[in-house]
Image: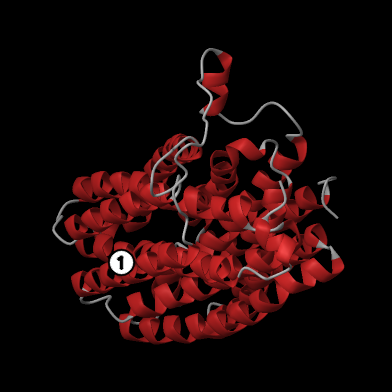
Amino acid sequence: MENAVEKKGKFPYRLGFGILFGLLGWLVPYLGVNSTLLPAKIQQIAPGQKVQIVALLATIAMVVATIANIIEGALSDRTVSRWGKRNPWIFAGMISTLICFYFLTKVTTISGIILNWSLFQVALNMMVAPLVAFIADKAPKKYRGSISAFYGVGMNFGTPVGTMIASRYITNINSGIYIFMVFEVIFTLIGLFLVGDGSNKGEKVPKLHGSELIEAFSFPIHGDVRDFYFAVFGKLLFVSAQFIITGYQLYIFTDYMKLSSASATHNLSIMSIILLITGVSFAIIGGPMADKFHSLKLLVAISTVAMGLGVAIPAIDPAPWTMFVYAGLSGAAMGMYNSVDQALNVTVLPNPNSAAKDLGIVNLANSLGQVFGPICASLVIGAMGYRMIFPMAGVMCLVGAGLILMIRKVK
């Protein structure tokens, strides 16, 4: 059935800004804590084992996030309530992540951090998959690229802003976490209000039994899944390469470039500003370009190659300028990539009736990449030192670009 907004030809600005604010609601606090404040807390508790602990934490979080994303996305697809099928999950995720953040300020042991962060992954994915599904639920086909651009702007704004805020609180970690908690409440509620997902009472959800029950809570195996999995693994490699750098950016400045904590904080802020400017600039133009030229696949592939060049640069010289060049190239790449990526993902879905679950699996590449990247980096750092993580990230991007170009359904 044709979307009413599409019939009228009006651009759904409320949906776009709702997705933007909803994304910032979870992304800024999560990345700020995950990339900076959590490593800083680990460094306080166990400085001698910090690299290994970050990798262990990432491994456990990856397993938990994988299971939680699939189950919570599938349950969201089948939720019927007066508040809609996405809102209850996003709101519950907000409350749960706030609880985890609060207890993170109280834990003083590595085992406590691991338990807390595992529970946080369950809570976080209550928000991630249902929010992305709004694009499939509500965005008219002809505007998917532009609506995806709102998501892309949020991704490229949220990543450096989270780091910029967190870098100011490396020596006062708990205050930084409390600020992120307030930020999350305000932005998430604004996002839900703007999207305005009303009651879906009366919507018929077929009962599941046998193979249908298994399929509802598993990776898709029916329909056109070839392109779907190329998109999944292409995204996984792109995000993994990004977080090889992001996951260890504090340690890159302090251990690889031998800077003091104060100097590292200063350079993290500069890098974040560069990421912010380039990322948001390219995110704004990416979606409209995709809608106009119908070039989703090519734009995603070009962005992935550009990211590959950016992440390889710091291998040239252990000096801050290489991280600034990385920030410029990768910021532009992430801006373009994130602005059209969700439109590509919606296009390759094998079954629109399981949009949240399947989009959750695609976007699971975000969660898995954020932990798979640091795991790979930890192994390479331990065996060969920091310098080799940069070319490794570059190769990941080139392989990811190849997978994206193999997608047939999308131009």
Q: Which quadrant of the figure has residue 107?
A: bottom left
State whether residue 334 is above or below residue 229.
below
Residue shown at the point (27%, 46%) measured from the top left = 114
Residue shown at the point (41%, 65%) measured from the top left = 193
Q: Position of residue 378 (x, y in %)?
A: 46, 53
Q: Which quadrant of the figure has residue 397?
A: bottom right
State whether residue 29 is above or below residue 120.
below
**Quarter of the picture holding the C terminus:** bottom right
> Looking at the image, can residue 65 be seen?
yes
Q: Which quadrant of the figure has residue 156?
A: bottom right
Residue shown at the point (32%, 85%) measured from the top left = 262
Mark 1 residue type: Val
Q: Position of residue 125 (x, y in %)?
A: 42, 48
Q: List the residue tagged with mark 1.
A: 185
Q: Nearer the viewer, residue 99 or 387?
A: 99
Please state if 350 lies on the left or on the right of 322 as rendered.
right
